[in-house]
Amino acid sequence: MEAKNTADTLGSGFLSRMALNDNKAGMEGLDRDKINKIIMEASKGSKFYENELKKEQQVNQRIGRMMKQAAQITEQQLQSAQAQVDKLTAVLERGRELGRVIVHVDMDAFYAAVEMRDRPELKEKPMAVGSWSMLSTSNYHARKFGVRAAMPGFIAKKLCPNLIIAPLNFDKYRAVSLEVREIFAEYDENFLAVSLDEAYLDVTDHLVQRLSWPDSMRTHLLRDGERKESVEQPAPDDLSPVLFEDSPTASASPCDAVGAVVFGTSAEEAVREMRFRIEQKTALTASAGIAPNMMLAKVCSDKNKPNGQYRIPAERQTVMDFIQDLPIRKVPGIGKVTEKMLSSLGITTCAELRQKGALLSLLFSETSWHHFLQISLGLGSTNVERDGERKSMSTERTFAEMSDAEEQYGLCRGLCRDLSQELQKEGLKGKTVTVKLKNVNFEVKTRALTLSSVVSTEEEIFAAAKDLLKAEIDHVSPHPLKLRLMGKFTLFTQWALCWVTKAVGSLNTIDKFFR
């Protein structure tokens, strides 16, 4: 196994949790051993390293227990388990949905791209957005050095001494995100935004309507500057984003006149048009995946990054062929911990995930092995949640070490203000307030308070959040409460809300940022 070989190369002090994950777009073909060695040397002795070491030991203990359990499984148990897996497989196959066209759109290196757009001098330099404590994203020049999101800035600077780290500016990113969402709404008014820079859309109905549209409704003009530049050389490939050659149904968009692009009626053309309009409106590029379900669409959006798209046609065999050799780490929801546990069982691809389904059903919870089976069959949700059904909304903050109580209260109020605005915009209220903080030792604490009535205003939410934060400050008194990261994540039902201050890139969410 590659992870094991790398560990052997670097010695017993190596932590697989901190190893380079080169599955991320723009990080292909890097010298893993060299980068991992730098990461380890830069990390040793830091609180970040100590916390990673503790987590690594916990994962290794889990794997040890799992392997002991696996060694005790009999052939008879495996045969019985296989029958159960086969039965569920038949049920899942009968319910396979191929009739929807789901799109996942992901803005390319969003925060970094916005900063480079507004500061052109950064475009050709390795740069990242975040702080010395933690990065939120990096541009593609920086990724060639192994620099990426959820990496401490001090480690990134060791990998790339010339790295420029720009501070986060969420007000600016939200404004750009709103511009992009206005375009999404024209293809699916009930699209699901899962963050500032990505969203799922069900364009099935749009495509039906699109078939009857005249060319004029599918024609879009270039920005004035680009239109003037295109007069001498009006090449179609230069006028709209290129659909990469390995897409099953690649095609070029015709140009009806200099400065105008006419898009077709197919799913590929509709998504090309969407990406083209995003670039024209924001000067930023987006990548997209088109597939029969949300899981596959998410995988596809990463296939031709940056500024590309990929489609899996709605055919069972095509889906199965696509999924067979797909590394499990490419699948949404499988992070470093799950990857390491599955790798210890000899599972690195989705095909192996299916082949060892019986073993997995005996070692993992019912929810987990059911999920693994669905992945191995290329199945995923086709129900893009409507705005009225949203179960979550999120935003986050990252900062250097903060120990002043007044600053902490100020940040807490700011988060409450953001949350209140989002809730009131959606017409929602909540009842449970949960505060989650990560200190400078990377320890995470969560505290919750259920109120007697539902709330939605800044003052109401802050009153509860302030009490929870004050309790943590008082708990360590007379010493200051030293915080490293704070954000918020909300979960709600029709009657209840959960508000969380969450550590961006914290250890309990590290898998998300290393995908």
Image (tube, rainbow, N blue to C red):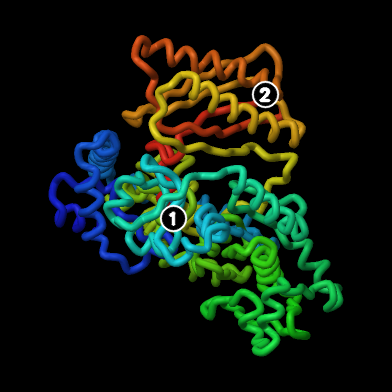
Residue 32's place in the image compared with 150, above or below, is below
Can residue 7 be spotted in the picture? yes
Which of these two is toward me, 80 or 509? 509
Can residue 298 be spotted in the picture? no
What residue do we see at 47% from left, 52% from top? Answer: 373
- The amino acid on which the numbered mark 1 sits, given as a three-letter code, is Ser
Residue 490's place in the image compared with 4, above or below, is above
What residue do we see at 46% from left, 19% from top? Answer: 405
Q: Is residue 54 left or right of residue 327?
A: left
Query: Circle 2 sits on which residue?
Result: 458
- The amino acid on which the numbered mark 2 sits, given as a three-letter code, is Glu
Which of these two is toward me, 348 or 306? 306
Image coords of residue 49 (percent x, y): 25, 39
Which quadrant does the N terminus fall into?
bottom left
Query: Mark 1 Cα within 10 Å, few/some/many (few <14, many 20+)?
Result: many
Image coords of residue 179 (percent x, y): 70, 54
Element type where label 1 sits in the image = strand
Which of these two is toward me, 370 or 16? 16
Could you give the CA–CA distance between mark 1 and mark 2, rounded to whole angstroms?
Answer: 33 Å
Q: Which mark is residue 217?
A: none
